[in-house]
């Protein structure tokens, strides 16, 4: 995978089928009804049970709407995946106006993968990768891919704009 900056947003190229699968899983993960995922994305926030119940009644519906809108936006952007002629892999444009939603969606998907794979802080350490189950290893690799994309979107790489995306020739 490579990343580039264009006037319109960020482009990720040479996305392998496994990478595309991981990205297509993002909306499904943040919409998951699995109790572990819901608990991780919407944890208890109040010590007082009455306060917690009020928070859940008033705040959770709005948070759920935010998750849904992010999932829909990510799906729309993923519908724009383009094949790369030489490699057969895919290219994705994330417009600047969608970056905040993508960051939130990627983070939520990483949290969901963490709980679904029953990961722990110990398993997350690179030296413990071989001790993780196959399911956990796959989750770790997917979590790291999502983290790399987040890193690019957060500006951790010093990418200068290559100009308008329309001028870019997909090879």
Image (cartoon, rainbow, N blue to C red):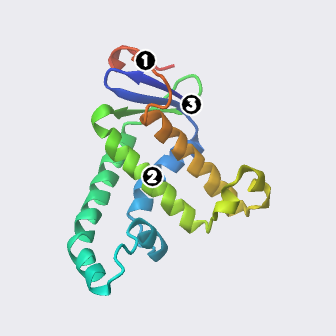
> Which quadrant of the view contains residue 130?
bottom right
- Residue found at x 69% / y 60%: 123
Position of residue 162 measured from the top left corner of the image (x, y, whole percent)? 41, 15
- Residue found at x 23% / y 79%: 54
Distance in Å between CA atoms under marks 3 and 2:
28 Å
Position of residue 128 measured from the top left corner of the image (x, y, whole percent)? 76, 56
Q: Are marks 1 and 3 in contact (CB under 8 Å)?
A: no
Q: Earlier in the sequence, mark 3 or mark 2?
A: 3
* Left or right: 167 as drawn, with respect to 147: left
* Left or right: 137 as drawn, with respect to 25: right
Q: Are marks 1 and 2 in contact (CB under 8 Å)?
A: no
Which residue corresponds to mark 1? 160
- 109 over 47 or under it: above or below: above
* Left or right: 16 as drawn, with respect to 137: left
- Residue found at x 45% / y 61%: 29
Position of residue 132 measured from the top left corner of the image (x, y, whole percent)? 74, 61
Which residue corresponds to mark 3? 88
- 101 over 61 or under it: above or below: above
Which residue corresponds to mark 2? 107
Which element is circle 1 on? loop
Nearest to the observer: residue 1 or residue 159: 159
Q: Residues within 10 Å of mark 2 (few under 14, many from 20)?
A: some
Which element is circle 3 on? loop
Nearest to the observer: residue 46 or residue 68: 46
Which element is circle 2 on? helix
> Which quadrant of the view contains residue 124?
bottom right
Position of residue 42 measured from the top left corner of the image (x, y, whole percent)? 37, 69
Q: Earlier in the sequence, mark 1 or mark 3?
A: 3
Q: Pick out the residue farthest to the front.
A: 47
Q: Earlier in the sequence, mark 1 or mark 2?
A: 2
């Amino acid at each position: 995978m490579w990343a580039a900056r264009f006037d319109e947003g960020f482009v990720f190229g040479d996305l392998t089928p496994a990478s595309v699968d991981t990205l297509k899983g993002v909306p499904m993960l943040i919409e998951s009804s699995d109790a572990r995922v819901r608990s991780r994305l919407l944890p208890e926030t109040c010590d007082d049970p009455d306060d917690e119940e009020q928070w859940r009644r008033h705040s959770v519906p709005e948070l759920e709407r935010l998750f849904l809108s992010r999932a829909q936006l990510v799906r729309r952007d993923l519908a724009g995946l383009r094949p790369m002629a030489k490699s057969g892999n895919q290219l994705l444009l994330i417009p600047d106006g969608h970056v905040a939603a993508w960051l939130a969606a990627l983070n939520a998907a990483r949290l969901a993968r963490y709980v679904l794979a029953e990961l722990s802080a110990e398993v997350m350490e690179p030296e413990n990768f071989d001790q993780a189950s196959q399911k956990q290893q796959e989750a770790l690799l997917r979590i790291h891919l999502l983290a790399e994309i987040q890193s690019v979107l957060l500006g951790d790489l010093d990418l200068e704009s290559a100009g308008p995306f329309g001028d870019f020739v997909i090879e």
